Amino acid sequence: MDQAIQISGLQKLYGDTPVLTDFNLSVPKGNIFGLIGPNGAGKSTLIGILTGLLDYDDGSIVINGRELNEYNELMIKREIASVLQPPLLFEHFTSHDFLHYICDMFEIGRPDRQPKMDSLLEYLGLTEFEHAKINKLSAGSRKKLSFCAAILSEPTILFLDEPFESIDVISIGRMKTILNKLQENGVTIIITSHILEIVENLCNDIAILHNQKIIAYLDSESRKQLQKDASLSEIFESYVQVEQPKNDVLKWL
């Protein structure tokens, strides 16, 4: 199977502190891929590296067949999109102007963009905020606006870092519908989330990041076997070896 992303021997340090060590991962094209791990495991750092926002210290990254380096970075960035945590937005733009700016940057034709933009805003409940300044939007609306911008840029790979945080239940369902349609069109989607139920139901393959590297890769077949007897949450806890609290830790309640 063709790989959208191939990472070999990745190393990332903050000062003298390692965040990712000898990190290896392959993500198949057209996959909705879930990356889960405890707080501070390095999920957001990895997304930052793959989207070109952070440097790394060693290793190699290949995205859509191109090595991620200074020569290929611009070409790669034209093929990817992201929703980060927190979203990167232009605070004093209106939602309308921000979406048009993104479309201009990715050279999305004006006759095509307006109906797409209007339908996305309506579908995700943002129409009433189209001409509001971004710095006046709620956390959930900001996240949904960032999601709209990412979809409008027509990526082949979409990175979503905690995309459902602060989002209402109805909008989560609609975002999942959009992601499934994108996958049908061949888009590769990489999701980090602490909401394991969503990862469990939405993603094809799942990797667990812990202690600076991938400690488990669960493809659809291995998940079927494991999840006959346990939920994803229980599988996750067994891999990261979560320490169980003492029975009397909350005896004062």
Image (cartoon, rainbow, N blue to C red):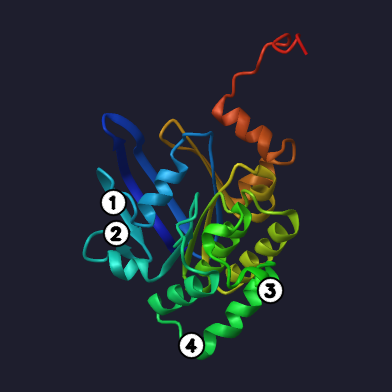
* x and y percentages locating residue 147 in the rendered image: 56, 63
Query: Looking at the image, is 37 positioned above or below residue 3?
Result: above
SS for callout 4: helix
Circle number at residue 68 = 2
Q: Which residue is mark 4?
A: 110
Quadrant location of the C terminus? top right
SS for callout 3: helix
- Residue drawn at x 46%, y 64% is 92
Q: Amino acid at mark 1?
A: Ser
User: Of tags 2 and 3, which is closer to the observer?
Assistant: 3
* x and y percentages locating residue 72 in the rendered image: 26, 66
- Residue drawn at x 64%, y 49% is 166
Say whether disc 2 or disc 3 marks the residue closer to the N-terminus. 2
User: Of tags 2 and 4, which is closer to the observer?
Assistant: 4
Say whether disc 2 or disc 4 marks the residue closer to the N-terminus. 2
Circle number at residue 122 = 3
Q: Left of 29 or right of it: where is 204?
A: right
Q: Which residue is mark 1?
A: 60
